[in-house]
Image: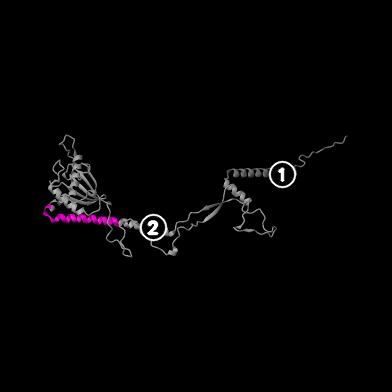
Amino acid sequence: MPDIIIKKVKKGGHGGHHGGSWKVAYADFVTAMMAFFLLLWLLSSSTDEQLHGISNYFAPESISQSNSGAGGMLAGTKLADAGAMRSENGAPVIQMDIPPSPDATTVETQNKAQTAEQKAEQAAKAQEKKEFDKVAEDLKEAMGKSPELKELSKNLLVEQTDEGLRIQIIDKDDTSMFPSGSADLRDQTKLLLKQVAMAIKDMPQKIAIEGHTDSIPYSHSNGTYTNWELSADRALATRRELQVDSLSSDRFGKVSGVADTDPFIKDNPKDERNRRISITLLRGTGKQAPAADTPKTNDSTELTPNLFAPPSRPDTDPNDRVNPDAPISRPTFSVPSRN
């Protein structure tokens, strides 16, 4: 019987030792590629200033690459007249001047000047209000001295408004200041205007005069002469009478007729009280007199009549004064320029 030979083949001869090593190598490759593409992305998204800063981090430009002095490990730095020499390989330097900061004394002086102006403005307004109150009191006193004027006091209205001191002469209780449809002054109207002129002749304010009518249409001239013309003519007649009563022509700032557009009795435009003359001392006009309680200076000299002038700065020690011809010293700093 012949011999039977059985051969057994073992598969995967070297697979036991190297079966997983390629996975480690592949993982390292993928990690390296990911880091590479991440680096490319960061470089593409960085600004020029950031790239310049990164390059300076790895190769600082502030370190000189040249040798000076004796050379070797014990080499020193050669000093020039202006100090240590700058490396020729460093970045150029830009000199920039910083404007000087405002002097604290100057700021304080400006604040004091503003405060003084505000106080002067408030003092001027208070002084003007006091003058207006005096005019109203003088008129009231004058109207009470004469029986004839006392009877006409119901036709005189004095009030302070935002525009100024308003003195109104109105028709009331069938007592009219002008004949119907006419600009001729009645005798009692002239008497009232004379008292008004005496009360305001020494006041500095400009004067505005307005003529008012009721809403009853003027029908004596076939439409060619209306309440507009009538109110304007009455205002002009009032101005002429005040000039006769010693008021100069340069005191008048405005003379106008407004017809029935601004009624005194708004609910009843036909009321007789809507027929009136308004004389207004315009607030804030004219040359104001200084307040009576204005403080004096130490040397007893008179203050300037301009209430809005800022106070002068007191003199300082001559040694502390600044020379106007001296050069101005300003701080500087250096920054590296962009390439």
Q: Is residue 21 above or below residue 223?
A: below
**SS state under label 1:** helix
Question: What residue is at 17 percent from the left and 55 percent from the top?
Answer: 140
Q: Dot 1: within a 10 Å radius of its alpha carbon, few (fewer than 14), some, or many (20 or more) residues?
A: few
What label does residue 300 carry, if any? none
Along the line of sight, which residue is nearer the eye, 277 or 31?
Answer: 277
Per the model, the C-alpha gap separating discs 1 and 2 is: 83 Å
Judging by the rendered image, the residue that carries numbered circle 2 is 111
Asked if residue 144 shows in the view, the reply is yes
Question: Where residue 141 sits: x, y (%)?
Answer: 16, 56
Instruction: Point out the tag, 1 or 2, that comes first from the N-terminus.
Output: 1
First to last magenta residue range: 123-148
Counting labels gives: 2
Q: Which quarter shows the N terminus?
A: top right
Q: Which mark is residue 21?
A: 1
Q: Characterize the magenta stretch by its predominant secondary structure.
A: helix
Residue 265 in view of the camera: no
Q: Residues within 10 Å of mark 2 (few under 14, many from 20)?
A: few
* Residue 107 screen position, x and y as percent: 41, 57
Q: Residue at coordinates 39% horizontally, 59% vertically from top-left?
A: 109
Amino acid bearing label 2: Asn
Q: Camera-side residue: 174 or 6?
A: 174
Image spot of residue 261 (x, y percent): 22, 42
